[in-house]
Image: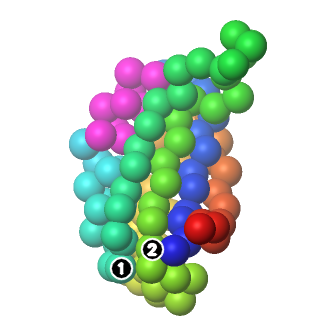
Amino acid sequence: MVKGTALYGDPEDPDAFEEYYANTHVPLVKQIPNLQRFEPARVVATPDGSELPYYRIAELYFEDMEQLQAGFSSDEGQAVAADFPNFATGGVTLFFSEIEA
């Protein structure tokens, strides 16, 4: 299994981010072909109480790298990527990883 991870920086307007994310971006994400599981989360604390490095994290799970690449290169996947500038004013870092047993 593999996953795509999105790490969101602090948005300029958190309320606007949350509204757009929940009502526009997440429905787009859920349409990505081959997506097996989607886990959005809000970052709430660090172990030492220091400043949060990210505002939100989202993890998108796929059976294998081929399925992930097909999902992200689809029209639906491209729509998700094209949507980031519409709400991710704090920036977004994306990467893919393999889940180890």
Q: Is residue 27 above or below residue 101?
A: above
Q: Secondary structure at mark 2?
A: strand
**Rendering colour mode:** rainbow
What's the residue at 31%, 32% (across, down)? 19
- Residue 26 shows which numbered tag? none
Q: Which residue is mark 2?
A: 62
Give residue 6's position: percent from left, percent from top.
Answer: 57, 51
Give residue 62's position: percent from left, percent from top.
Answer: 45, 74
Q: Is residue 32 above or below residue 52?
A: below
Q: Residues within 10 Å of mark 1 (few under 14, many from 20)?
A: some
Residue 14 seen in render: yes
What's the residue at 45%, 66% (across, down)? 61
Which quadrant of the view contains residue 71? bottom left
Circles 1 and 2, Cβ within 8 Å, touching? The answer is yes
What's the residue at 33%, 79% (across, down)? 33
Point out the tag, 1 or 2, that comes first from the N-terminus: 1
Give the residues in magenta. 14-22
Q: Secondary structure at mark 1?
A: loop
Q: Residues within 10 Å of mark 2 (few under 14, many from 20)?
A: many
Q: Which residue is mark 1?
A: 34
Q: Amino acid at mark 1?
A: Asn
